[in-house]
Image: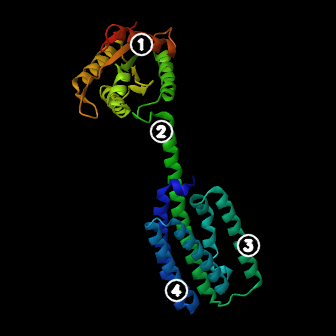
Amino acid sequence: MSVREARPQFWQVLKRSCQIAGSVDVGFFFIFHLLGSPILAWVNVVSVAMYAVAYRAIGRKQNGLAIWLIWLEVIIHAGLGTVLIGWDSGFHYYVLMFIPAVFVSMRLREAVVALVGLWSYYVALYIWMWSTEPLQPIAPDALLGVYLFNLSVVFAMFGYLSFFYLNIVTEASRKLRRIATTDSLTGLLNRRHMTHLLERELARFRRQGHPVSFLLFDIDYFKEINYEHGHETGDRVLEDVAAIIKDQLRTQDLIARWGGEEFLVVLPDSELQSARAIAERVREALMAREWQGSNGQPIAVTTSAGVSAFSRDDDRNSAISRADRALYRGKELGRNRVELET
């Protein structure tokens, strides 16, 4: 999939670019009338019309038409400006602005073809002007003014587009990081990232000796909830249980979706009994809530929890395994309870 298909923001930027370019061409209309170059002056009228149509096409989702109009306008306008008043006018710089844009608006193969076409056009224009005099030369001071104007516009457009591309990269990086570290359904940490953070927390325990406790929650009879009320209801229960657990925790506590209906909580600076009290608060909060299925039928949602504390002889797996044993002992004793494993 091309960035064009994946990034609706690109088309918003392109719409703004049409507005900016159209405004620049309005300015050029008056500039070239004053410089005595009516052909270029009226070319800008056509350019403004093309940008207006391209802007309207983007609004109507006719993106292919918009792209072709913009390409056609820039290629012809840059060529005419260069041929009429000379290479030193700086009109050729507008062609260069397509170099980064082609990779945002096209698939890779199309972009490479377009890039080769741009290079060929640019070189051909340069060779033509190297051996040919301008058709409507203007005074050197006026030519310098046009050059500086074009250079300023191109710099501004490059800056604007570069800022947009930077935002795309930053947002994509943030999205990938979020996908890599969080569970897509509940928004909690995923198991892989929790494992990484847990190793860091346990290393701190070994250095400083501060207590670390673990809570392992499992939703009771979750498979029956899915079977009787559907997976959509099951997903909603998972989301709501995750939110309730998180609400009972402190800022520094870590929580992850550890398995299908299991949640692991890591409590830095918490002794075993403090951890048990937190687990009880979570259990009571779940019981206090009125749960309903998609048809309004009440659902009983409870949790069993196992609690353990990290010791000097532990590694990550052994500490969590003790919490897991306590959890399943609670299930064997009737569920909806909190059990300790020292």
Q: From the viewer's perspective, is 261 left or right of 168?
A: left
Mark-to-mark CA distance, 4 and 2: 51 Å
Q: From the image, tell me which residue sits under label 2.
A: 178
The nearer-to-camera label among 4 and 2 is 2
> Which of the numbered marks, if any, corresponds to residue 31?
4
Which residue shows up at 51% across the image and 22% down it?
199
The answer to whether residue 205 shows anywhere in this view is yes
Q: Position of residue 99 (x, y in %)?
A: 63, 64
Q: From the viewer's perspective, is 60 left or right of 73?
A: left
Residue type indicated by callout 2: Arg
Mark-to-mark CA distance, 1 and 4: 78 Å
Label 3 environment density (alpha carbons within 10 Å; few <14, some 14–19, many ≥20): few
Which residue shows up at 44% across the image and 10% down it?
322
Which residue shows up at 33% across the image and 28% down it?
246
Residue type indicated by callout 1: Ala
Q: Position of residue 64 (x, y in %)?
A: 54, 66
Mark-to-mark CA distance, 2 and 3: 45 Å
Q: From the image, tell me which residue sits under label 3.
A: 123
Q: Residue furthest right?
A: 131
Q: From the image, tell me which residue sits under label 1.
A: 323
Considering the numbered disc 4 on the image, is that residue within a helix, a strand or a loop?
A: helix
Number of numbered markers? 4
Instruction: Confirm or deny contact between disc 3 and disc 4 (CB under 8 A).
Output: no
Q: Position of residue 304 (x, y in %)?
A: 34, 16
